[in-house]
Amino acid sequence: MGPTASGKTELAVALVERLPFEIISVDSAMVYRHMDIGTAKPDAAVLARAPHRLIDILDPAETYSAARFRADCLAEMERIRARGRLPLLVGGTGLYFRALAEGLADLPGADPELRAELAERLAQDGSAGLHAELARVDPESAARIHPNDPQRLQRALEVYRLTGEPLSAWHARQAEVAVPLRRLVLAPPREVLGARIEQRFDAMLAAGFVDEVGALRARGDLHPELPSMRAVGYRQAWQFLDGELDEAAFRERAIAATRQYAKRQLTWFRREPAAHWVDPLNEDPLAAARAFFEVAAPAVQ
């Protein structure tokens, strides 16, 4: 895993050529067909060397969720293992990694009437009153939630009253479907990453990125609020084609948005448990990744 433009694909392909791995893409934009340049999707030559699963599986008019990714990814992992190989998950969508690793609790939706009742109770008795009630019905959650966190206290009580089960029981079932992952984060220094992002975006422009977005826009069934068209770069290109931005502003905003996205990705990955971080400027990323992953590989070699 790693931020955009960190060199993940190159490293993953090198690993696949040396270890018994097959790649599964963990990228919320690469799932879409006809979005190749702006997503930095591997080209035909790269895919011939190292096929990627879970790319080009949806039309841009469709939506995709972390829950659907998890189901699709687990199915692909099973197929890879059946071939006597190991899945190598490669991408930068932190939510997808977390959904796979930790599972997703199928919690009930909000109940407006019950929420209004709990809000009234909060106004009368304060957070301490809600915390005391939660301690009676779900002591495990009460021990985990701070007494001065009314939003989480209300949600825990809402789940209990709606289902008759404590929130801690829901979380326990979620933990049962957890998938253990060995996590490697490829993270160049920020200034290096920023330069790479700028260089890559200019290469995308030269490769016809605006024409790619123009063809999608001309279909007539897509709009800027779709998840696919909200992807970094695509939103700004759409604004450019709508005349909201001139060429210089389009380039500047797209590069800035990509840098902000990379910053958010790094923030997310810092919360990943037991992740092994590799700075490709200070060590050979291929050697570091092989050393880190080979402990899992002998069983299938």
Image (tube, rainbow, N blue to C red):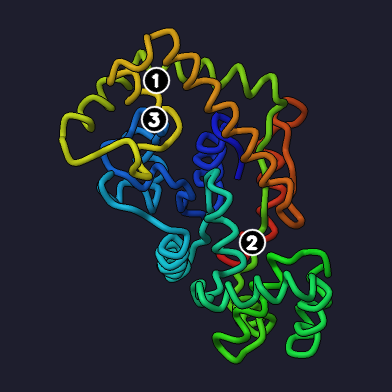
Based on the displayed image, in which of its 4 quarters is residue 248 positioned?
Answer: top left
Tell me if residue 125 comes above or below residue 206 in the rendering. Answer: below
Amino acid type, callout 3: Arg
Q: Which residue is mark 1?
A: 204
Amino acid type, callout 1: Met
Q: Position of residue 211 (x, y in %)?
A: 25, 21
Quadrant where the N terminus is found in the figure: top right
Report the label total.
Answer: 3
Front one among 201 and 249: 249
Query: 10 Å neighbourhood of mark 1: few (<14), some, or many (≥20)?
Result: some
Nearest to N terminus: mark 3 or mark 1: 1
Task: Report the residue at 38% width, 53% height from top.
Answer: 54
Question: Which disc is residue 181 wearing?
Answer: 2
Q: Which residue is mark 3?
A: 235
Q: Position of residue 154 (x, y in %)?
A: 67, 72
Residue situated furthest front in the rendering:
124
